[in-house]
Structure formats: C-alpha cells, structure tokens
Image (cartoon, rainbow, N blue to C red):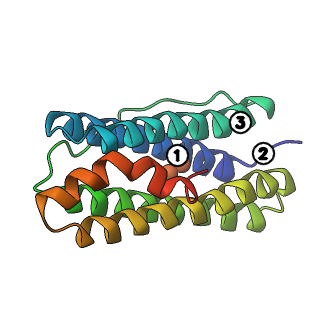
C-alpha cells in the first residue's frame, strides 16, 4: 500500500530522531566512562544500540513500502554534564522529546488512514512508556544518592536497578 508523502517525511524524520538519540546515548556513555561511572556507561551503551534498532525499524518500514530512507546531517549531541543527576535528566529529556515525535507520527498515521503505520507506531508508543519509566527512575535514584559512597554503589548496580523497567 502506498504511503502518503507527508507521513513518509514524518517517519523519515522520526528515524533521524532515533539516530540522534543513539548519538546522544553514546555521548552520555563516553562522559560516564571518562568520569569512571562504568555502570552508567554500559547502560547508556546498550541504549545507544537500542536506538539504532529503533531507527532501523522505521527505515525498514519505509523500504518495505517502496521509499528509500534519507539520512541527513544531525546536530551534535550534548557531550558534557555537570553531574550524574544532570546526565540522567538529559536522558529523560531525550526520551520525552522522542515520545512527542512518536505521538506526532501516530497522529499523522491516523489522519492519513494509514493502518500499517499505525500498527508500527503502536509498538513505539508502548516502548516509550518503558523508556520514560527507567529514565524517571534513574533521575530519582541519582538524586537520592547524595554521598560518594552511595553514588559508587548506584553506579555498580544501575543496570540491575533499572532492569525491570528496561526492555
Ligand atoms: Fe527510541
Ligand atoms: Fe529511547
């Protein structure tokens, strides 16, 4: 079934959003490694890979529907953070931004009566609930860990702490 030009453009730009999110998580991982927060670094590395999978899911859908995905220039991600809590808040802001993009795309899929895109985007809507859940929890845990001993312990266990939220 043919995809409308407007929806095609929106799905392409959402794929680019996901690629930007991947670069942002990679930057977060590098910053965490540089600060010796290796637990957070490996969590963010996994997120960077996940966002590439999301990008590919959208691009594969475009290809399946006869449209060649277009890669464009992306803005540079934020690379430095004043604290671990601010890094976690940055991750939360990224996810909230991404949710908005998914919702915009879903609204366009409804408007154009594009059922195939609606089904695809429903997966992303569910995914964003999980993504925002771990990001909120990460911010809470960072704020709670006030002394260096608590931060050390949080860093060692962060992937496990967030595992029930992270898909
Ligand atoms: Fe994503
Ligand atoms: Fe995400």
Nearer to us of marks 3 and 2 is 3
Q: Where is residue 73 in the image (x, y as percent from the top left)?
A: 36, 32
Q: Which of 126 and 107 is in front in this view?
A: 126
User: Compared with residue 49, is residue 85 higher up or lower down, i.e. above or below?
Assistant: below
Residue at label 2? 3
Q: Which of marks 3 and 2 is nearer the N terminus?
A: 2
Q: Which of 75 and 38 is in front in this view?
A: 38
**Residue 43 position by quadrant:** top left
Residue 85 visible in the picture: yes
Q: Is residue 61 left or right of residue 80?
A: right
Q: Which of 77 and 137 is in front in this view?
A: 137
The numbered mark at residue 157 is none
Residue under the image location 58 percent in, 58 percent down? 164
Residue at label 3? 62
Q: Distance between the residues labelled 3 and 2?
A: 8 Å
User: Do labels 3 and 2 touch, CB within 8 Å?
Assistant: yes
Q: How crowded is mark 3: few (under 14 residues within 10 Å), some or many (20 or more)?
A: many
**Residue 112 position by quadrant:** bottom right
Residue under the image location 48 percent in, 61 percent down? 134
Q: Earlier in the sequence, mark 1 or mark 2?
A: 2
Is the shortest distance between ligand 1 and the CB of mark 2 under 8 Å? no
Residue at label 1? 13
Q: Is residue 100 left or right of residue 112?
A: left
SS at badge 3: helix
Residue under the image location 42 percent in, 38 percent down? 22
Is the shortest distance between ligand 1 and the CB of mark 1 under 8 Å? no
User: Compared with residue 137, is residue 27 higher up or lower down, i.e. above or below?
Assistant: above
């Amino acid at each position: 079934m043919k995809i409308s030009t407007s929806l095609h453009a929106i799905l392409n730009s959402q794929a680019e959003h996901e690629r930007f999110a991947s670069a942002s998580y990679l930057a977060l991982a590098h910053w965490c490694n540089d600060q010796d927060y290796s637990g957070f670094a490996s969590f963010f590395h996994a997120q960077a890979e996940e966002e590439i999978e999301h990008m590919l899911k959208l691009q594969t859908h475009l290809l399946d529907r006869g449209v060649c995905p277009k890669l464009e220039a992306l803005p540079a991600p934020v690379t430095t953070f004043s604290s671990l809590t601010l890094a976690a808040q940055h991750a939360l802001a990224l996810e909230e931004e991404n949710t908005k993009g998914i919702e915009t795309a879903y609204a366009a899929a409804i408007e154009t009566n594009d059922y195939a895109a609606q089904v695809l985007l429903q997966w992303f809507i569910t995914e964003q609930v999980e993504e925002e859940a771990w990001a909120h929890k990460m911010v809470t845990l960072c704020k709670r860990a006030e002394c260096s001993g608590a931060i050390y312990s949080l860093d060692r266990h962060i992937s496990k702490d967030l595992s029930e939220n992270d898909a």
